[in-house]
Image (cartoon, rainbow, N blue to C red):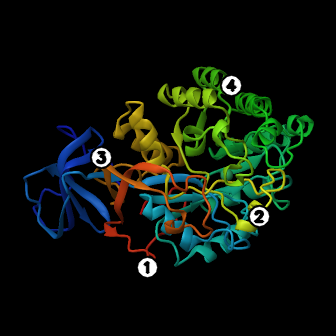
Amino acid sequence: MSHDSVEHEAGTVSLDPTGERYDLVIRGERVLTTAGIRPREVGVRDGVIVAMQPLGNNLDGDEVIDLAADETLIPGLVDTHVHVNEPGRTEWEGFASATRAAAAGGVTTIVDMPLNSIPPTISVEALNIKREAAQGQTHVDVGFWGGAVPGNTADLRPLHDAGVFGFKCFLLHSGVDEFPPLDADEMEVDMRELTTFDSVMIVHAEDSRAIDRAPQPDGDDYGKFLASRPRGAENLAIAEVIERARWTGSRAHILHLSSSDALPMLRSAKQDGLKLTVETCPHYLTLTAEEIPLGATQFKCCPPIREAGNRELLWEGLEDGTIDFIVSDHSPSTLDLKDLENGDFAVAWGGVASLQLGLSLIWTEARQRGLALETVVSWMSDRPAQFAGLTGKGRIAPGYDADFSVFAADDAYVVDVNKLHHKNPLTPYHGKALAGVVRRTYLHGEVIDSETPRGRLLRRGMTD
Ligand SMILES: [Zn+2]
């Protein structure tokens, strides 16, 4: 991939000034370029953007698409936190269904988490099993995280060389026995190992000792569940990650930030120059503990959805850059594991299903806060792509993959869980009215039809 073309005049450039035909030209008044939303024509050849010219230049294409007046062409979203669960727990979620849901939500790249599938992605052999399971059934591009568990330090470098994007660890029980947690000292050892090949440790930061000593969750009362996963447990674990990153010089990433209490120390660590990044998720930004009904275990996730005041501070953290980006943490299970009949938060699987809805959820909330579509899309495409080192993803610019969606920002819909594409029909957002409709999604310059899987399996550093 070459990015040596210079961008002139607010996003107008061509890698190919010869006037040849393009496979696809998309043109419209609203194309989200690196310089903002502009009237543009985008020329695509062999699945890659090769021309960006002012609207009216009439680029010649085998197929020419004119956007409707209410449509914006946005880069395909990049969701670096998805639990696909195949193989091993394919009844929870699989590559075909997850990537259909992704495409319907405008997401063209996902990076799959190393746990909940069996085997977990903690060795090259396990990675190969996962890749074989995914091969030929993905509707979007798919990359993989590796896992750091006790005893697999020697597997980290081979996994890196095999193309994983980094390594996930837990600091408390992960929810599945085959993916055990590290203690802080073990995490430090692995962080030191990762510095030798400049990989990143991505951490589920809740402290096991603090959770063990917290009140136990009990029954259908969300308040009791919330009390069982206190902010203090999250704050303590985040402090540990920060210090171990400081001591080792390792890149570190805080997954699914929920506790706003941690924002000042994250801000301070970033000011100190630590290689630290932070993500949060739509459920922490759009839902509140106060509104969760008795027994509504579709809202259960860890760390938990907290109070309205906490949510406000997370939005501030996003706007000031302490939080780098937004990803789904799509983590579904079968309906029986959500214990819907009893609604017992103590026994229900923890995980929110939302892969298809992220853009509309965040856009609905963000526009009320006066935030621009460009900002929202950057949080969900460009920033996560940069974080994962996906150099050809997340922007509409020459040299980038022709992954787009056509987004009608002022259109609206009501979420019907039975029309979503993920495997098990449960989501906390059923019945919600949302702004912003994804009308079509393109992968490598072709519309995703949800029948012909054209997704690629990505490796770190792969450039085509
Ligand atoms: Zn997760």
- The Cα–Cα distance between marks 4 and 1, rounded to whole angstroms, is 45 Å
Specify the amino acid type for callout 3. Asp
Q: Residues within 10 Å of mark 1 (few under 14, many from 20)?
A: few
427 or 151: nearer the viewer: 427
Q: Nearer the viewer, mark 1 or mark 2?
A: 2
Element type where label 3 sits in the image: loop
Specify the amino acid type for callout 2. Leu
The residue identified by callout 3 is 4
- Image mark for residue 337: 2
Q: Nearer the viewer, mark 1 or mark 3?
A: 1
Specify the amino acid type for callout 4. Asp
Element type where label 4 sits in the image: helix
Q: Nearer the viewer, mark 4 or mark 2?
A: 2
Locate residue 244: give its quadrant: top right
Q: Which residue is pictured at 59% across the width and 54% down the height? A: 165
**Does the residue at mark 4 contact the one at mark 1 (Cβ under 8 Å)?**
no
Q: Earlier in the sequence, mark 1 or mark 2?
A: 2
Q: Is residue 90 toward the left or the right of residue 176 in the image?
A: left
Element type where label 2 sits in the image: helix
The answer to whether one can see residue 452 in this image is: yes
- The Cα–Cα distance between marks 4 and 2, rounded to whole angstroms, is 31 Å
The residue identified by callout 4 is 261
- The Cα–Cα distance between marks 1 and 2, rounded to whole angstroms, is 29 Å
Q: Nearer the viewer, mark 2 or mark 3?
A: 2
Q: Residues within 10 Å of mark 3 (few under 14, many from 20)?
A: few
Q: Earlier in the sequence, mark 4 or mark 1?
A: 4
Tell me where residue 305 appears, x and y as whole percent: 67, 40
Q: Is residue 134 toward the left or the right of residue 235 in the image?
A: left
Tell me where residue 48 appears, x and y as whole percent: 31, 62
Q: Quadrant of the N terminus?
A: bottom left
**Does the residue at mark 4 contact the one at mark 2 (Cβ under 8 Å)?**
no
Q: Earlier in the sequence, mark 3 or mark 4?
A: 3
